[in-house]
Image (cartoon, rainbow, N blue to C red):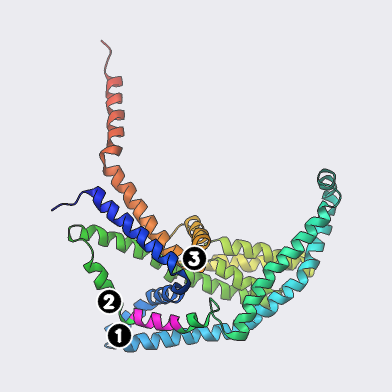
Amino acid sequence: MSIPLTRQLAFWVIASIALLIFVWLFKAVLTPFILGSVIAYLLNPLVKRFSTKGIKRTTSSALIITVFFAIVTIIIVIVAPIIAKESADLIDALPGYLDKIFQAIQPYTLMIQERMGENYIEDSKTFLKENISKVLSVSGGIAGGLAAGGQALIGMLTTIVLTPLVAFYMMREWPAITDWFEDLIPRDQEGMIKDLIDQIDTKLAGFIRGQITVAFLLGVIYAIALSVAGLNFGFLIGITAGFLSIIPMVGSTIGLLVSVAVAWFQMGEMQYVLIIAAIFIVGQVVEGNILSPKLLGDSVGLHPLWILFALMAGGSLLGIVGMLLAVPVAAVVGVLVGFAVMQYKKSPLYKTGHANNDQAKVIEAEPKK
C-alpha cells in the first residue's frame, strides 16, 4: 500500500521535532556522547583498516582510542600552560596597546569629540579596556583551568571520563549501529535514502576528517613559526588562528591582522611586520597546495558561510551541544535542501513555468495574419 507524500512528510517532521525536544531536554548530559560519536566517526576508517588485517574490532578500537587520547593528553599538558601564560601576559599588555592605538588616531578624533562630546573618547577607552580584559580573563581562566586541572574540552570531569568510553563502544559497535539504521529505511525508498546518506557522509568526511585536520596542522605551523620569530603572544595567536581555520580563511585572516598589529606595537619596524605577515602567506600557500589537496582531495565539503551560520545558530540555541551538533545538522540540511531543489525542478511546479514561457515564445514567433 502506497502512503501519500503528505503523510510521509508529516511523519518525518514529527520525528525531527521529537528529536529536537529530546536534545533540548537532555543537552546538559549529551556532550560526552556527541563528542564520543564524533571521535568514533573520525577514527572508524582506521578500525576498518585494522579489521581487514585480521585484528578483532574490539582490540583495534581499544588500541586506537588509547593512542588517540594519549596524544590528546600530551598535547594539552604541553600547550595549556603556554596558552595560560600568554593569555595572562596579553591581558596585562592590552591597556598599553589600546593607549598606543588611541594615540595614533588622536589627530582624527577632534571631529568625533565635537559631535559626541568631550568625554566620549575617554569613555570609549575605559569601556574597551574593561570589557576586552574581561573577555581575555575568561579565556585565560579556561586555559589556566586546563593547565591546572587537566579539564579537557568542556572542563567537566564526567566528560573527560565518559568521552573515551562512548567513543570506544561506538567504534566497536559501528557496523551493528549502521546496520540497525539501514534496517529502518523504508524498503521502497531504500536506494534514494542511501544515496542521500552517502552525500551527507561525503560532506561530513570532507569537514571532520579533512578541514579539522587542516586547521590543527595550520595551528601548529602558525604557533611554532610565530614563536620562533619572537612575536609576543605568538603561540596563543597561532593556536587561535588554527582553531578558527575550521572555517576556511577566517582563522588566517584574523590571525594575520592580530599578529601584524602586535608586531608593529612590539618592534615598530615595517621589516618585522612583513616577516610576520609572510608567515601567514606561506601558511596559506602550504594549505592550498599541500594540506588541502592531500587531506580534502576532491570531496565537496560545506560552504564556509554555511558553517559559520550553523555554528553561531547552534551555539545560541543549545550552547556547546548546539555547536557540536551544528556541522552534522548543517550537512544534513544542505543535502536535503539540494535534494528538494532537484525534486522541485523535476516537478510540474517548475516545468509549468517553462512550458508557459515556451508557449508564449511560440505565439510571439507565429506570423500575424
Q: Which segment is the magenta one?
A: 162-171
Query: Mark 1–mark 2 contact, CB under 8 Å?
Result: yes
Query: What residue is pinned by disc 2?
Result: 175
The percent position of residue 170, horizontal first and vertical second, equals 35, 78
Q: Quadrant of residue 100?
A: bottom right
**Disc with the residue nearer the chain's start (3 vs 2):** 2
Three-letter amino acid code at disc 1? Answer: Arg
The reply, left or right, for residue 30 in relation to residue 2 is right
The percent position of residue 202, horizontal first and vertical second, equals 36, 64
**Disc with the residue nearer the chain's start (3 vs 1):** 1
Q: Is residue 184 visible?
A: yes
The reply, left or right, for residue 323 in relation to residue 342 is right
Which residue is at 35% across, 65% downward?
A: 201
The percent position of residue 13, horizontal first and vertical second, equals 33, 55
- Report the Cα–Cα distance between label 3 and label 2: 27 Å
Local packing at callout 3 (Cα closer than 10 Å; few below 14, some 14-19, many 20+) is some
- Give the number of the disc on residue 323: 3
Query: What residue is pinned by disc 1?
Result: 57
Front of the two marks 3 and 2: 3
- Whether residue 361 is in magenta: the answer is no
- Report the Cα–Cα distance between label 3 and label 1: 30 Å
Work out whether residue 110 or residue 31 is closer to the camera in this orientation and state it. 31
